[in-house]
Image (spheres, rainbow, N blue to C red):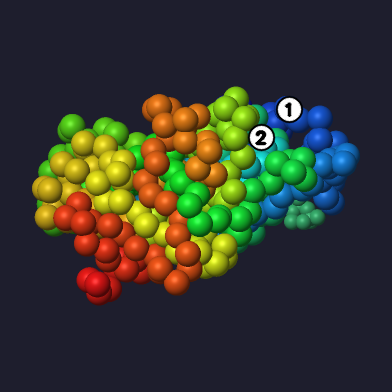
Amino acid sequence: MTEINKNKSLEELGEFGLIDHLTKDIQLKNPSTVKGVGDDAAVLDYGSKQVVVSTDMLTEGIHFNLMYVPIKHLGYKSVIANLSDIYAMNAHPKQITVSIALSSKFSLEAIEELYSGIHLACKNYGIDLVGGDTTTSLTGLTISITVLGEAEKDELVYRTGAKPNNLICVSGDLGGAYMGLQLLERENEVFKVNQHTQPQLEGYQYILERQLKPEARKDIIQIFRKLEIKPTSMIDISDGLSSEIMHICKLSNTGCRLYEDKIPMDNQTKAMAEELNINPIVAALNGGEDYELLFTLPIGDYEKVKNDPDITIIGSISDANEGTNLITTGGSAIQLQAQGWNSVK
Ligand code: ADP
Ligand code: MG
């Protein structure tokens, strides 16, 4: 970023000046990117591959709160959420477009920060930023990102392929992003009452990172190739385990049994849940924003995944007529709901 621009306001820079400022250092990394920013459209060459497209929109006040989310992290996380959707297809993300609507309250520095997070995510995951749109809004910030990825036809994994007796697996651990959010919101409430207080965040680095700087599980789809496995179905966990497994079961026309005591959770997630009097299993089932991968495997793959530290087997797929169930530590079956569960059978 040049010194001259540092002192300019967004208004002085103008739309074209801003776009140029935000995109001028982009160096294209992927052979499939023929033309990036600078023309009426980007040009991509995918040869004989299948192209995977996904898009997400985030609105200030609904999806993020700039009172406690550093804007650089917001940029990073907005990209991550999109990449995660492509990995969930067992595909490789390659390009993104970024569209922003800005109100006059934003300084050039703030938008530079947003883009530094966006560029960092692109660098870490080998993604080309190939276009976007820039417009004004009356209040707040809206970010819309579209991601394109590629895969061979027979690599792609949909939500529809789970079969009875398949293993249900999850990467990483769950509930952390939600507990990180609860902590940030608690400290924000304290701050609103007394602006001289320092937030009490010590000891909770991991869950704060899960909320503020999540990563997408590129490594897991690489593990699949290494172990020579292909999931029968897959989805990323953006809304919570409960609603995601229900999507798989509905679209695959199956039921499931998830085991409460198998669901992986970090100690900080459990500690924060205890401090706030929340059942940690609720954070894992309903919390969301973990960006882990939930997938099903033929039972024959058990030996390949059973000792992998990044993968946990949490249950099995059953017939549709058995319903979608959580088997509690006490052994009873509870019917899952998109937001938790309703009745004990
Ligand atoms: P048009 O008038 O055709 O919509 P623009 O002037 O909006 O074109 O955009 C010019 C170029 O800059 C295009 O390549 C577009 O994709 C890119 N671009 C516009 N806004 C952004 C942004 N916020 N981030 C990245 N690229 C952008
Ligand atoms: Mg435009």
Q: Residues within 10 Å of mark 1 (few under 14, many from 20)?
A: some
- The answer to whether mark 2 and mark 1 are in CB contact below 8 A is yes
* CA gap, disc 2 and disc 1: 7 Å
| SS at circle 1 | loop
Q: Residue 227 in the image: x percent, y percent?
A: 57, 27
Q: Quadrant of residue 158?
A: bottom right
Identify the residue at image location x=26%, y=33%.
205
Q: Residue 137 in the image: x percent, y percent?
A: 56, 64
Q: On the rendered image, what quadrant is the C terminus found in?
A: bottom left
Q: Earlier in the sequence, mark 2 or mark 1?
A: 1
| Nearest to the observer: residue 310 or residue 254 | 254
Question: Is residue 60 among what the camera can see?
Answer: no
Is ligand 1 closer than 8 angstroms to the Cβ of mark 1?
Answer: no
Identify the residue at image location x=19%, y=43%.
270
User: Quick check: 27 left or right of 72?
Assistant: right
Q: On the rendered image, what quadrant is the N terminus found in?
A: top right
Identify the residue at image location x=47%, y=30%.
303
> What amino acid does circle 1 point to?
Lys
Q: Residues within 10 Å of mark 2 (few under 14, many from 20)?
A: many
Identify the residue at image location x=50%, y=49%.
166
- Which residue position is annotated with label 1? 29
> What amino acid does circle 2 point to?
Ile
| SS at circle 2 | loop
Determine which of the numbered discs, if any, sits on residue 127 in the image: 2
Determine which of the numbered discs, if any, sits on residue 176 in the image: none
